[in-house]
Image (cartoon, grey):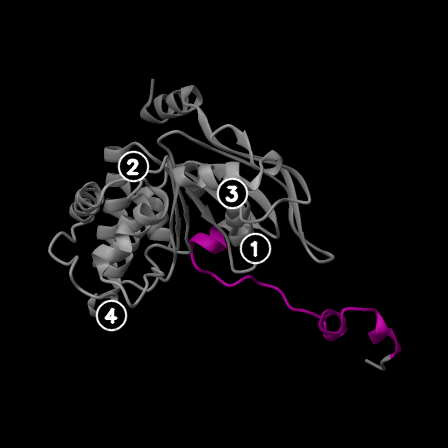
Amino acid sequence: MTNQATKKKLQKERAKVIEVTDVVAHYGPRMVLKGVNISVHEGEIMVIMGRSGSGKSTLLRHMLALELPTSGAVKLLNQNVSAMGAEALFDLRRDIGVAFQSGALLSSLTVEQNIMLPLTEHAKLDRQTMEIMTRMKLEVVGLSKFGHLMPSQLSGGMLKRAALARAIVMDPKILFCDEPSSGLDPMTASALDELIIKLRDVLGMSVVVITHEVESAFNIADRIAVVDDGEIIFIGTVSEVKKHKSTYIQNLLNRSAEAGEIHPEEYLRRLTGDGSVKDLNL
């Protein structure tokens, strides 16, 4: 049995920690997600890619239960979030860690205080235990000597690592990362990729990554989901995505612009949002 076949077999045997089924979502009258189906398994790194405006950030918000779908269902850790009350949802989110694109550290707190914040807000632990847990996570991300610094004193890569440390301080079962390597130099981005894989392997968590960075996606992904116009058009391994014949996917991977011209009348119709251009003498 090939390595790829073995990986697929193991993946099928693992439990699903996220299940998105036929999810439709609207912003006002506009349909943003159009019947999306995707699942993430235990111990898997799932990368979600797509051009700006494709719907991947909206999908992330629904996976995080920050928004509820118009129709369809989202299950986190085998619980249907649409059917949960606020208190149950609050408890569920303790098993979820989120590393935001900007880091989102509080500027008035030290790095160590930022990382400890989820513990002080949500865990009923004594101060010494929280400090030990915080130092352990600082060690995991390679920032053990920098906990006393303020966020403004950190480099971009260190801020990303600190954000990861805060996201995992409560040992979540699922980690979400929004553009983790965005804006970093290649060496720092590569080190962050290795850290994400290490977190998965050492802590046994499932990871969902939203990224535009093709090289990073290829480095870390067990599977890649490609989103376009509110739909998932393909889910597969790195090798499967690389070989896919879709022009959109190949343009995305090769950072190529889409070919095609827009007729002036169609361009005006998009701007006006109605058919009033038929009365214009174009």
Q: Which residue is mark 2?
A: 200
Give residue 167's position: percent from left, percent from top: 33, 47
Q: Whole-Å distance between the Cαs marked 2 and 3?
A: 19 Å
Q: Which residue is mark 4?
A: 152
Residue at image mark 1: 54
Label 3, residues with CA under 10 Å away: few <14, some 14-19, many ≥20: many
Looking at marks 1 and 4 on the same chain, the residue that comes earlier in the sequence is marked by 1
Provide residue 120's location: percent of width, then percent of height.
Answer: 31, 48
Going 58% across and 48% down the picture, which residue do you hit?
67
Q: Which residues are magenta?
A: 250-279
**Mark closest to the chain's N terminus, 1 or 2:** 1
Q: Are marks 1 and 3 in contact (CB under 8 Å)?
A: no
Q: Say whether disc 4 or disc 3 marks the residue closer to the N-terminus.
A: 3
Which residue is under mark 3?
Answer: 63
Check the image and report above or below for 277 versus 98. Answer: below
- Name the residue: 19% across, 47% down: 131
Q: Position of residue 138 (x, y in %)?
A: 19, 49
Task: For mark 3, give the secondary structure.
Answer: helix
- Indicate which disc, 2 or 3, sits on the residue closer to the N terminus: 3
